[in-house]
Image: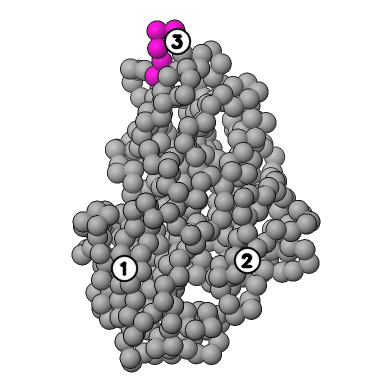
Amino acid sequence: MKNLFIVSVILFVTLSCGKNNDPNQNVPRIVIKGTLSGSNLKGSSAKSANSLSLTDAKKVLVFNSTSYKVFDIVNNSFTADAVSGTATAIAFLDANNQYIGCLTAGGLNVLPLVSLKDGDNTVIDLSTLTLNGTSVIPANNPLGNSILLSNEAIGWYKELGGYYESLSKNIDADNNGVPDILSKSDIGLSTIFNISCGPWTLNNAAMQVVDTNHLYINYILRMGTGKALKPVNTNVIVSGPAGAPHNDIKQMSFAFGPDCFLASFCRETSPTPGNPLGPVTLPFSKGTYTITLENKNYTLNYANISAKHFFILAKPTIHTNAKNEIVSVSIDYRDTENKFVTAENYVYQTQVTLEGSQTRLVQMGALGENPEAKTNTDLFNFTLPNPVPMSQLNMLSVMYLDLIGNCYNINYMAQ
């Protein structure tokens, strides 16, 4: 089972790809617009070395952890769009693509594009924007107006501030003054959380309560790149964080995608008694890491969002036919107190896999497609292409991407 678990992780890594700036027009997108103020404080970021002001801004970069798009600023105004159902950041660039600052609204440096007032037809008008340091402040705060989140939910998203601060700093990982994604040489870091979550539910049996105070969690650092980075040497060195570096970082995998490469890394330690995941892999500390690829160094910030921040119980029920064959799997989403939640506020894509003793029996859904493709839209019900005998099933995994691009791989076993 230990080897099967590792294989399932590597299969996920090899299927996913990096950012894309050529979106499918069928994807639901939210319109975002604003006007730049003529009176601004100067920027003070190291990435804005020339102390640019917002009046220097000529481009708007709209991005989440897996995709981006650039829009021109015309006559001090812009109209942009972003993918519905994602947590999205907005950066402002000058004519030479130098970073000026990121949108900060209601204390958030990310717009959670969920619970929207008019659904996918929502238009977010930020009104007049001003610059304070590297924070771009809108006169019209969309939180509570266009984005209908509770104060509790807003406070929850504020805890993601460090994550998107790191993401905005990583726009220029090679430190040449130009955002890497514009030359398709970007590098992104995210986390795979592998979690053992007890048994599955069969047909009409009562769903068991999971003790979320005693979860087993393994951590994997995932790296994805733009298509301009296709090295000959597949050995990637990760060192850090600066000031207190780990001495146990090991590369797990490397794979080329259609327009990127992907690699995964872990910090492996000895198994603990009773841990069903086998070897324990430790979390990576937040901070600045150096990525060495073919003798060139890239500097990236990594924010280790707690595994439990976006964690919800994606609890599967297996449905069988008269021959005791699996025909479908349904998913209930609950919080750590086993109360039903609105899945779309936590989950972007879901994948269900059934594992046998040596091989994968079936995969339904795909986390590997670029979110712009958005063909994998079902979060709740998954029908097998062909029935599978229940006797062949050893493990069921529900994998989902959260709104910021981290992957939760939740494993369920038979009782």
The residue tagged 1 is 32
First in residue order: circle 3 vs circle 1 = 1
Location of the N terminus by quadrant is: top right
Farthest front residue in view: 25
Could you tell me residue 389's position as x and y percent? 51, 13
Farthest bottom residue in view: 39
**Labels 3 & 1 near each other (Cβ < 8 A):** no
Of residue 300 and residue 246, the one placed in the foreground of this image is 300
Could you tell me residue 298's position as x and y percent? 67, 68
**SS category of the residue bearing label 3:** loop
At horizontal 36% and vertical 17% (from top left) the residue drawn is 203
Of residue 46 and residue 271, the one placed in the foreground of this image is 46
Queried whether the magenta region covers residue 322, the answer comes back as yes
Whether residue 77 is situated above or below residue 117 in the rendered picture: below
First in residue order: circle 2 vs circle 1 = 1
Inspect the image, locate mark 3, and give the three-letter code of the amino acid beneath it. Asn
Inspect the image, locate mark 2, and give the three-letter code of the amino acid beneath it. Ser
The residue tagged 2 is 185
Residue 147 left/right relative to 255: left
For the stretch drawn in magenta, the main secondary structure is: loop
**SS category of the residue bearing label 2:** loop
* Neighbour tally class for label 3: few under 14, some 14-19, many 20 plus, Cα within 10 Å: few
- Magenta range is 319-323
At horizontal 44% and vertical 78% (from top left) the residue drawn is 59
Task: Please tell me whether mark 2 or mark 3 is closer to you in this view.
Answer: 2
Inspect the image, locate mark 1, and give the three-letter code of the amino acid beneath it. Ile
**SS category of the residue bearing label 1:** strand
At horizontal 30% and vertical 76% (from top left) the residue drawn is 34
Question: Picture quarter containing residue 392?
Answer: top right
The residue tagged 3 is 324
